[in-house]
Every structure is written in structure tokens, then in C-alpha cells.
Amino acid sequence: VMFGNPETTTGGNALKFYSSVRLDIRRTGALKEGDEVVGNETRVKVVKNKVAPPFKEA
């Protein structure tokens, strides 16, 4: 892929077409208490949404 996101969705075109909501979830870092990792920081991007406004980020 020359332009855009190089990632693909497995399962053919049916998942992209029939899904109502698609989210792109990325791990951005680790939450630590001292030296111990207790969780993950994530970024969630709405790729497709038929039930609310699309393309929001959290």
C-alpha cells in the first residue's frame, strides 16, 4: 500500500461491510507503580461507526 494505513482486516470484505462499529486500539505505553507494570496506556480510534459520529479519538 503506497498511501494510507498499511494494515488490513482479516476475514475478507464482509467484516468491513457488515460491521456497525470498528475500533483501532493501539498500546501507547505502560502504567507503572515503582518498577512494576500494572496496566497499559492505549489509544482508541474509531474507524467506522454507523451509530454515532465517526473518526473520534480517545
Image (cartoon, rainbow, N blue to C red):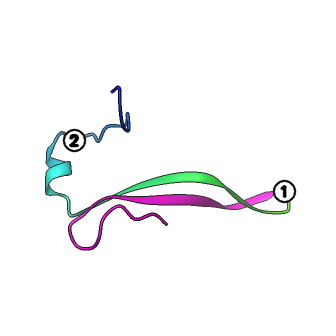
Label 1 or label 2, whichever comes before in sequence order = 2
Residue 11 versus residue 56: which sits nearer the camera? 56
Quadrant in which the N terminus appears: top left
As drawn, the label of residue 21 is: none
Which quadrant of the structure image shows residue 41? bottom right
Q: Where are the magenta residues, as a range?
A: 35-58
Above or below residue 14? Residue 20 is: below
Where 50 sits versus 26, above or below?
A: below
Q: Position of residue 20 (x, y in %)?
A: 20, 64
Q: Is residue 8 above or below residue 50?
A: above
Mark identifier at residue 35: 1
Residue 48 part of the magenta segment = yes
Q: Secondary structure at mark 1?
A: loop
Return the x and y of residue 16 as percentages of the image width and height.
20, 49
Question: Which amino acid type corresponds to the residue marked 2 in the rendered image?
Answer: Gly
Q: Is residue 19 left or right of residue 43?
A: left
Amino acid bearing label 1? Asp
Q: Which residue occupies the foreground of this view, 55 or 39?
A: 55
Q: Which residue was labeled with disc 2?
A: 11
Give the image location of residue 18, x and y in percent. 14, 56
Q: How many marks?
A: 2
Residue found farthest to the front: 3
